[in-house]
Image (cartoon, coloured by chain):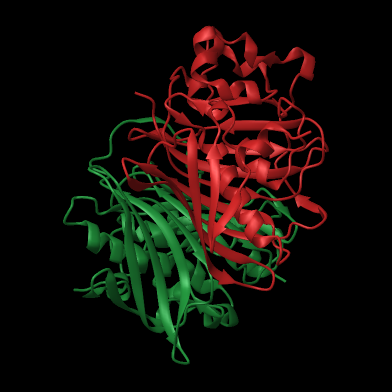
Chain colours: A red, B green
Amino acid sequence: MEHELDRGIAVVRSDDGVYDVHLDPGWVVGGGVNGGYVLAVVGNALRAELTDVGQPDPLSVSAYFLTPSRPGPARVRLRKVRVGGRRTTVAASLVQDEDGFEVERVSLLGVYGSLGEPGEVERQVPQPDLPPVEECLDASDASEEFLRAAPLLQRFGTRFDPEHAGWRTGKPSGQGVVQGWFKLADDRPLDPVALLLVVDALPPATYDLGRPGWAPTLELTAHVRAKPAPGWAIVRHATHNVSGGQFEEDCEVWDSTGRLVAQSRQLALLPR
Amino acid sequence: MEHELDRGIAVVRSDDGVYDVHLDPGWVVGGGVNGGYVLAVVGNALRAELTDVGQPDPLSVSAYFLTPSRPGPARVRLRKVRVGGRRTTVAASLVQDEDGFEVERVSLLGVYGSLGEPGEVERQVPQPDLPPVEECLDASDASEEFLRAAPLLQRFGTRFDPEHAGWRTGKPSGQGVVQGWFKLADDRPLDPVALLLVVDALPPATYDLGRPGWAPTLELTAHVRAKPAPGWAIVRHATHNVSGGQFEEDCEVWDSTGRLVAQSRQLALLPR
């Protein structure tokens, strides 16, 4: 049985350094296709390109979002910037045709390698202390309007920490944190490419500051630190610096064993 | 009077999208030229290119370090990925000739714009509570060997917080923090391009974990959040996640008014 995400990020090599993809409407949020999903699509094309050389895993990926992606056909264009024995640095773009022109949606640089077996953790940020999954809140409790604007919520099995889920009922905590348990709705196991999606899967931390709405990402860098173990992950979004019409949002992902497997930071524009 | 940094990051436009530069030996640390200095060189070429359109400031810059930069001539090649009325996304590389071939040292993506006058801060990470400048420690107290390996220390007027400067005498705090007061040695005022240097100017936070030595950066993303006010800045480096032979290092820079003006995160390899 094919999982939703695998169908959504499938790539077909059509030329040297070019992969055809199809952005699925199920991953729309607000006015465009979710940035994390687009990142996973590009990340999957890079995985396909670099698996043969034993470097299938995104160690770091920095994406600059240029124009909103639309559901439908798209292409990933990639270029190897530097090929190394242990790591390869890559440049990639996701492009779509619009009125007969090729328009770039996302441009990224990344370094791929092999994460291997998770080794020892010398030091890490502890995961937040969440209530049990069954005491956390399902996104399906959100308003109908909210769900209509964000069909991608139905792709996830997110259970939000009630302490930071007041945005669902107009009572944000004011702390700038959105966190909860995370899995994909159809139980597809998480892997390094899926983590590129996970770091941009929750509502922006600005929801918890009483500033709901779309927060366009200028830049997002994700570091995948280890292969995730199966089971529920924990995801935490937090913003600490809000000024000049911008905010940064840090995301951390821990797998079911409590290991930090990914972290990301994005610079985004405050919702109007 | 020309300041050291301005001489070091001077660019001369030589062709469409090409700037000639000269990497100064005064900015060497360990086996190569300091990454933050290289970032400021590239950032200055981008500033030169985008000043005419009123977008001289780096809002976000993501650099992937490919090969060690050497003192001597170099070129910055840049390309506008997307030109907007308020922001322009750019790709750039710093290259050097080596045995008759052009070798890429650093590849980056960034978004430039105008920081304008610093507006209201809605929320920010408070600056650390440091002892007064005169009670903090000058890098010139470091061992001769240390200073020989790092001539760039003489470009800075850093005063290290004694609580996290135990690496100078083999007694690290174990907290993974290196912080202090910062200015350029010749009192050149900080500006957005200089902040690209500042975020990589202190020794790696791993020094404070008892793991001194060169920590090669794979990726560094800097967000410049506001124009810095003149005077002593405060810089803090911290690492929270050390595993799999890698660590992330977060850097925050506050200006003399206490405003957070830049933050960065890098993914680096642990010193051997």
Q: How many marks?
A: 0
Residue B134 rendering spot, x and y as whole percentages: 44, 58
Is residue B136 something one can see in this rendering? no
The part of the image, by quadrant, that contains residue B50 is bottom left
Q: Residue at x 73, y 60 (%)?
A: A114
Question: In this rendering, would A269 be left or right of A59?
Answer: left
Q: Give whichever of A151, B112 is nearer the camera.
A: A151
Q: Is residue A196 above or below residue B152?
A: above
Residue B269 rendering spot, x and y as whole percentages: 66, 64
Q: Give whichever of B83, B43 is nearer the camera.
A: B83
Residue B143 rendering spot, x and y as whole percentages: 59, 78
Q: Is residue A169 above or below residue B175?
A: above
Q: Residue at x 54, y 64 (%)?
A: A16
Question: In this rendering, would A173 be left or right of A224?
Answer: left
Is residue B114 something one can see in this rendering? yes
The part of the image, by quadrant, that contains residue A40 is top right
Q: Residue at x 52, y 78 (%)?
A: B32
Q: Quadrant of the C terminus of chain A?
A: top left
Q: Give whichever of A1, A111 is nearer the camera.
A: A1
Q: Is residue A90 above or below residue A159?
A: below
Q: Is residue A56 above or below residue A102?
A: below
Residue B30 rendering spot, x and y as whole percentages: 56, 78
Task: Kindly give the residue lying farthest to the left in the view shown.
Answer: B52
Q: Give whichever of B2, A38 is nearer the camera.
A: A38
Q: Quadrant of the N terminus of chain A?
A: top right
